Image (cartoon, rainbow, N blue to C red):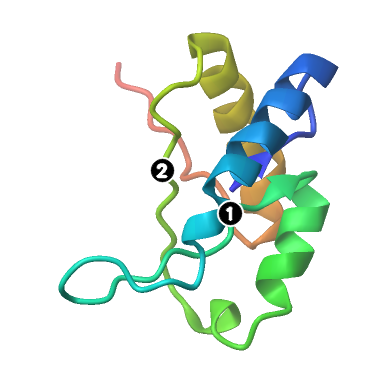
């Protein structure tokens, strides 16, 4: 999942190209256990949330793990993480824990 809420036009192009380059692996069993890859979701947080929440299984999960692509830049990682934490995760029902301040 790559939210693009605050992405530049260049980042959006790169993210879409990345997802397109991986499309051929979707739905094809990989390895001895037949691991299946899901489609990469690239779009606004609202678009990604709509796609996830429209599936039968996603509303039933308690936890979600997000993995960052290995070959993106530090600026890309910052943008993706900020959009995930600030836009996508709240739409999906996540709220950050209350911060504790030590004296």
Residue 97: image x %, image y %?
Answer: 46, 45
The alpha-carbon separation of the residues under discs 2 and 1 comes to: 17 Å
Q: Mark 2 or mark 1, which is nearer to you?
A: 1
Residue 23, numbered circle: 1
Task: Count all numbered tags in the image, as a single digit.
Answer: 2
Q: Tell me: residue 57, above or below residue 10.
A: below
Q: Is residue 59 left or right of residue 64?
A: right
| Nearest to N terminus: mark 2 or mark 1 | 1
Residue nearest the viewer, comparing 56 with 39:
39
Residue 100: image x %, image y %?
Answer: 38, 32
User: Which quadrant does the C terminus fall into?
Assistant: top left
Residue nearest the viewer, comparing 101 with 91:
91
Q: Tell me: residue 98, above or below residue 36.
A: above
- Disc 2: CA contacts within 10 A as few (<14), some (14-19) or many (>=20): few
**Which residue is painted at 54% across and 84% down in the image?**
57
The image quarter containing residue 13 is: top right
Q: Tell me: residue 93, above or below residue 2.
A: below
Helix, strand or loop under label 1: helix
Residue 5, numbered circle: none
Residue that sits furthest to the left in the current view: 32
The image quarter containing residue 85 is: top right
Residue that sits furthest to the bottom in the current view: 56
Residue 78: image x %, image y %?
Answer: 55, 19
**Which residue is painted at 41% across and 43% down in the image?**
67
What residue is disc 2 on?
67
**Which residue is painted at 73% across and 67% down in the image?**
51
Q: Is residue 9 left or right of residue 29?
A: right
**Which residue is painted at 67% across and 33% down in the image?**
17
Helix, strand or loop under label 2: loop
């Amino acid at each position: 999942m790559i939210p693009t809420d605050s992405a530049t036009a260049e980042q959006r192009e790169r993210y879409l190209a990345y997802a397109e380059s991986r499309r051929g692996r979707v739905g094809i069993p990989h390895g001895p256990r037949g691991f299946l890859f899901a489609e990469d979701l690239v779009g606004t947080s609202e678009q990604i949330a709509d796609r996830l929440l429209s599936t039968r299984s996603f509303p039933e999960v308690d936890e979600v793990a997000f993995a960052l692509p290995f070959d993106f830049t530090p600026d890309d990682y910052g943008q993706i993480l900020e959009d995930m934490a600030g836009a996508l995760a709240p739409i999906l029902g996540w709220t950050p824990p209350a911060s504790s301040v030590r004296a």
